[in-house]
Amino acid sequence: MTQPLLAVELFAGAGGLSIGLESAGFRILLANELEKDFAATFAHNHPQSKVLCQDIKTIDFRQELKALGQPAITLLSGGPPCQGFSTVGAKKQNDPRNSLLYEYLRAVAEIRPLYLIFENVAGFARMYEGQAYRALQQGLRDLGYNFVSGILEASDYGLPQKRQRSITVGWQKHLPAVNLPLPTHGDSAGLFQLKPRRTLTEAISDLPPLTSNDSADSYALPAQNTYQASLRGNCQALTEHNSANYGEKMQQILALVPPGGTVDDLPARLRPKAYFSNTYARLWADRPTPTITRNFGTPSSSRCIHPTQNRALSTREGARLQGFPDSYHFVGSKISKNLQIGNAVPPIFGFVIAKEIVAALDKLTATPIHLEEIHA
């Protein structure tokens, strides 16, 4: 291959997917993200990328690539915001955000990448009796792409968190096909030997303990395993490791939630009048965490209380569970940072999928075809 592996990312968020793509050898040439803090975080951590902080509907991708010298794009990646498709909250088929699926397809038509990644919530294929998924499939076929789809589980690839995403990988019909990545972690069966799934403790055991309204700027211990070592890199100072200022009632609640416990373990006087089953719930130390959300710093929301300390997860702990390097800088308030982290696509998904695309491209090296000829 004589061309660099150039990528364009849509709905880029804080850049989680891009971290993985870059680790697999891609360069993110152009990215689009509407939310200002998200875009600022992406731009800070990906200084070689041109970041468009604007509504995707206003972007002419042909003009943008022309301004960048008409580069040949190997990969287009991204997924429209999932609120219109999500299994959480109202499911409104006429939600205007659903039209962003068609903006993604328009970008494919204008950019004509060799390969593409479309990601969304795990239930994407079932929403509206499958209408959205069929629209994606038909749109890709009409544009001349073959594709493969599936639901990937992040803990199957070494992330210390249970998190599923619906993934579609497409390729121009004359190119080598792509396989979805096989699991590397999980329960071994027969001759298929897998590494054990990573646990919460494996992700954060080197970070110092915190009390209420506390923070720390140095590591408590050397990296205890390869996961911690890879995310720490050359970092000497610890950032974003902090806790909220809890009132007296909240401190009582946190102190009374047992290991793995929930709001149901609290005395009646401390329970809210209405609540979900995972309210005021403590995490387990010896297993991957449940899917973290934007509220991983709020004990009254989803299960996010530290397994041994009376507080919710810190921003750094949330970033660790998503697979962000400790050197990654998030822009904005703590609420904004937690939102960016909770909404992110874990980098591991980008890495394992991109490695399969690279493997498909490597098959071209056995022929005299060059990437610039494919794009012609």
Image: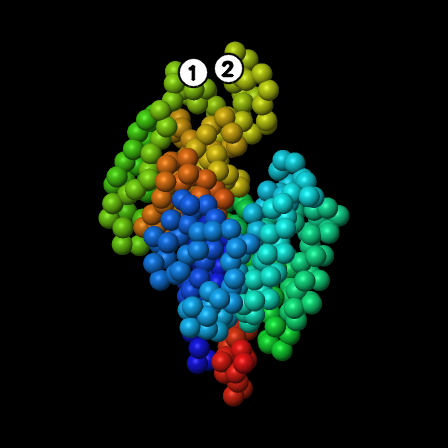
Q: Regarding mark 2 in the picture, which secondary structure is present there?
A: helix
Q: Residues within 10 Å of mark 1 (few under 14, many from 20)?
A: few
x, y (%) of residue 341? 44, 44
Instruction: Say if residue 159 shows up in the picture.
Output: no
In the rendered view, does 44 fall on the left or right side of 290? left
Q: Amino acid at mark 1?
A: Lys
Residue pictured at 46% horizontal, 45% vertical: 35
Residue denoted by label 1? 249
Q: Is 367 displayed left or right of 138 in the figure? A: left
Query: Are the residues tagged 2 and 1 within 8 Å (C-beta)?
Result: yes
Task: Indicate which disc residue 46 carries.
Answer: none
Residue at 54 percent across and 81 percent down: it is 376
Which residue has dot 2 on it?
A: 270
Q: CA distance from mark 2 to mark 1?
A: 8 Å
173 lies left or right of 345: right
Single out the residue that lies furthest toward the top: 269
Work out whether 339 lies above or below 72.
above
Q: Secondary structure at mark 1?
A: helix
The foreground one among 123 and 98 is 98
358, 6: nearer the viewer: 6
Q: Quadrant of residue 336?
A: top left
Relative to 294, say whether 144 is above or below. below
Colour scheme of the picture: rainbow
Position of residue 211 in the picture relative to residue 138 (left or right): left
